[in-house]
Every structure is written in C-alpha cells, then in structure tokens.
Image (spheres, rainbow, N blue to C red):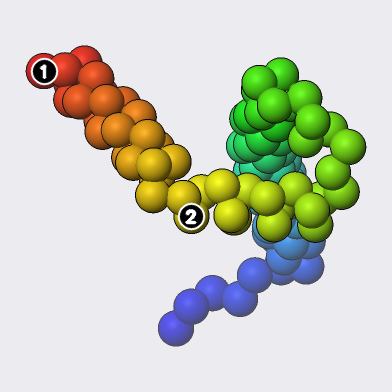
Amino acid sequence: MAKQKTIPQLEAEKAENERKIAQLQHKKQQLENRITYYEKGERRKRAHHLITRGAAIESVAPLTKVLTETEFYAFAEKALAVPEIKGLLMEAVNEHNRAEQKERY
C-alpha cells in the first residue's frame, strides 16, 4: 500500500505543479504571440503587394484614379474579358512560370 503523504509534502507538490502551470501558460502565450507576429507579417506583405499593384495600374492608366471602387472593378472585369488582354495576361503568366522553372533547376 502506498505511503500517505504529509501535508507539507502535498503543499510542496501543489506549489511545484502551480509553478509548472505558470511555465506552460507563459509558453502558450509566447506561441500565441509568435502566431500573431507571423499572421501580421503575411497581412503586411499582402497589403504591400496590393498597394504596389494598384499604384502600377494608376501609373500606366492615370484615368483610373477618378473611378470609384465599383466603377474600377467593373472596368477591370470588362478589360480582362477582352480576348487580347486575356492572351497577354496568359503570356505573362507562362513567361513567369518558365522563369521560375529555370530557377529551380
């Protein structure tokens, strides 16, 4: 039969377990902070990407600056539906993919 623990032993075990809980909670907080940091980084990259693309469009087509977002989206949909534009876009994507393949090998 197991020997019963004394009150001081139980209190010491309790204190040790509370210390371990505090350590684990701290570790959990560190991991949550790291996740948040990486998520923010991805959002920043995406925001930067979208801003630079928008700026590029405005620089080559300055008239787009006066359009509302709805008007701009309607324009973009129409422009990208034109077969010649689709072809140019596909050409650019294919060229990009070829360049990426060369970099890998």
Decide which of tag 1 and tag 2 comes sooner along the chain: 2
In-image side of 39 versus 12 (left or right)? left
- In this rendering, the answer to whether 54 lies above or below 23 is above
- Report the residue marked by disc 1: 105
Specify the quadrant that holds the C terminus: top left
Q: Which secondary structure lies at badge 1?
A: loop
> Mark 2: which amino acid?
Ala
**Residue at image point 21% right, 16% down:** 103
Foreground label between 1 and 2 = 2
Q: Residue 81's mark?
A: 2
Dividing the picture into quarters, in which one does residue 61 lie? Answer: top right
Q: Left or right: 4 with respect to 72?
A: left
Residue 4, image x, y percentages: 61, 76
Q: Nearer the viewer, residue 10 or 102?
A: 102
Give the residue drawn at x 56%, y 47%: 79
**50 vs 15: above or below:** above
**Residue at x 77%, y 25% (from the top left corner):** 62
Give whichever of 46, 31 is nearer the camera: 46
Location of residue 94 in the rendering, given as x and y in whole percent from the top left corner: 26, 33
